[in-house]
């Protein structure tokens, strides 16, 4: 790698406040906020809106839409009037 052109790659904590979940990983992202991690060291923390702990795809709590009602309403509204 060419020296001096790459951003710093350092340990960072990503925290999902909605699920009360945090994980330590390495990233080039930075933050002014810090948090003391389980190992006693202080790391920058980045708050995220959603993670694998709160996303419906990963948690299995996805909502099913009322597609049958929508289809029936469409057929009533745009149904052909008689055979051609």
Image (spheres, rainbow, N blue to C red):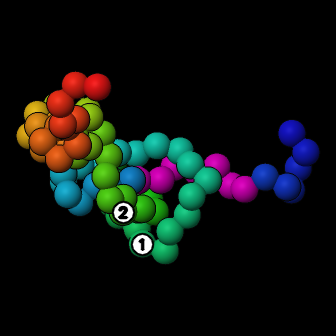
Quadrant of the snapshot with the C terminus? top left
Q: Are marks 2 and 1 in contact (CB under 8 Å)?
A: yes
Looking at marks 2 and 1 on the same chain, the residue that comes earlier in the sequence is marked by 1
Q: Nearer the viewer, residue 81 or 47?
A: 81
Q: Nearer the viewer, residue 83 or 63?
A: 83
Spot occupied by residue 60 in the image (x, y as percentages of width and height): 16, 31
Residue 2 lies left or right of residue 52; in this view the side is right
Identify the residue at image location x=86%, y=56%: 4
Spot the residue most to the front. Answer: 84
Residue 82 lies left or right of residue 11; in this view the side is left
Residue 70 lies left or right of residue 29; in this view the side is left
Spot the residue most to the right. Answer: 2
Q: Nearer the viewer, residue 30 or 52?
A: 52
Q: Comparing marks 2 and 1, which lies closer to the viewer? A: 2
Residue 55 visible, this angle: yes
Identify the residue at image location x=49%, y=74%: 32
Quadrant of the snapshot with the N terminus? top right
Mark seen at residue 33: 1
Spot occupied by residue 58 in the image (x, y as percentages of width and height): 26, 33
Identify the residue at image location x=17%, y=47%: 77
């Amino acid at each position: 790698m060419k020296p001096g052109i790459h951003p710093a790659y350092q340990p960072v904590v990503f925290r999902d406040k909605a699920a009360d979940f945090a994980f330590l990983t390495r990233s080039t992202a930075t933050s002014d906020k810090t948090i003391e991690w389980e190992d006693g060291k202080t790391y920058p923390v980045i708050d995220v809106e959603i993670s694998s702990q709160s996303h419906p795809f990963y948690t299995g709590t996805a909502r099913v839409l009322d597609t049958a009602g929508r289809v029936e309403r469409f057929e009533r509204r745009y149904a052909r009037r008689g055979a051609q």
